Amino acid sequence: MKRYVLKPDSFLARVLKMLPLFRLPLLSLVVLLLFLLLTQLIYAGIGYLFPRVKVVDWGTIEHGQWVEVLMLRPEMVLSAPFTGEAYLLVEEGTRVRAGEAVAELIKTKAAPNLSKEDLLALRTIAFRLYHLDLEVGAINKELEILAEHNPNPVGKQEDRQFLTTRKTELLATRTRLSHNAETVLADWQSNYQLVVAAQPGIFSTHLDGGENLDLLEHHQIKTDLNQKTSVPRSFNSKLTAGKPWAKMVTEYTQTLVCQLPAGVNLDPPEEAVLLANGRRYQLSFLATDYTNRLWYFTENSLALELLEKRSFSAYLIYRSTTGLRVPRPALVYEEKKGWTVTTSVKGNKHCIEIEVVDMDDQWAIVQGLPLGTAIYYQ
């Protein structure tokens, strides 16, 4: 019979020599593990012997999916006419009316020579000139209509005379105002510009490079979903000639392109809810592409939080069900009976067959139970 002898300098011999030193920690660890196992067994036994009770209430189950979102909206980019500085007259994200002044631009060399009173005078004159030009343009259109469609020569002559006189007065006023502006700032139209909203919309200085994306350019949209547009830069009052510095969102609706993960195939909903930054945004379904991976929605709130985003990840709730709600663990499925729950009838536990309308990992929406029924579950 062979005998094996441990060498004093072997690894196993050194471990055996150190074993007495770790006896107490190892024993403590074993006791702790046994205690944790025992508590789990006790907890499971209590749950089995004393099941929890939940009253049937009214609730909602929501089904969602994480998606990549690209925001498309009608935006008119404002470019600087010269190198200078911009002074905002409205706050970021303000909804403005047509004809409302949003900013004034001043060329760099002219800014040090202007006082607050000078700026106020130029702003007042420029705003008045803007409205004069609109009125002159309207008169020109009326004169064109009179020349083409008025069948009464006498009435035509009187109307043309009135409009021509009014136009002459407006042009004279315009000349006088321009002269007054020249006394404040020489060559003022080359050194100063009042930015007025040509149509209603939302004024924003958050530019990210995605302002010109087109909904019909599907390839470009997919590219930008994978290669995200840049983060919107904060407003810089310094202007560079020909460079964009702000934009106008010209409509009160925007399109969301939601890209589903690969391998996910779902039926597109008529309506959905987007969860972003802890807020919920209602969406209306617009269309889907041939792969059913790109869902198009419209959103009408144009909240400031969304205007600051272009491409991001968000949770899309594509289906929700509201009704009588019970905990998912309360459901038991039997082949012959189908879904059942356990309730109490005159102090005795009793199984009731129900119809499950919808469910998720935690809750189920059911039919066949009165509101307020107490049910048992482990």
Image (cartoon, rainbow, N blue to C red):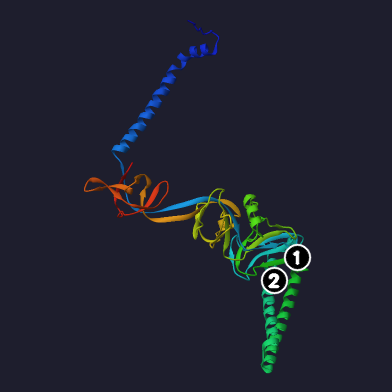
Residue 176: horizontal and vertical position, in percent? 74, 77
Residue at 69%, 93% in the rendered image = 153
Mark sitting on residue 105: none
The answer to whether residue 233 is seen in the rendering is no
Task: Check the image and report above or below for 273 versus 26.
Answer: below
Give the residue type that dot 1 points to: Asn
- Crowd band around label 1 with a 10 angstrom C-alpha radius: few (<14), some (14–19), many (20+): some
Q: Nearer the viewer, residue 266 or 8?
A: 266
Give the residue type that dot 2 points to: Ala
| Residue at the far bottom in the pictured view | 154
Q: Nearer the viewer, residue 278 or 288?
A: 288
* Quadrant placement of the C terminus: top left
Residue 288: horizontal and vertical position, in percent? 56, 58
Residue at 51%, 14% in the rendered image = 15
Q: Nearer the viewer, residue 152 or 260?
A: 260
> Mark 1: which secondary structure?
helix
The residue to which callout 2 is attached is 126
The answer to whether residue 225 is seen in the rendering is yes
Q: Nearer the viewer, residue 162 or 278?
A: 278
Residue 115: horizontal and vertical position, in percent? 70, 64
Residue 5 shown left or right of residue 324 in the figure: right
> Mark 2: which secondary structure?
helix
Mark 1 or mark 2, earlier in chain: 2
Residue 376 shown left or right of residue 272 in the figure: left
The residue to which callout 1 is attached is 191
Tell me where residue 296 sits by quadrant. Answer: bottom right
- Crowd band around label 2 with a 10 angstrom C-alpha radius: few (<14), some (14–19), many (20+): many
User: What's the CA distance linking mark 1 and mark 2?
Assistant: 12 Å
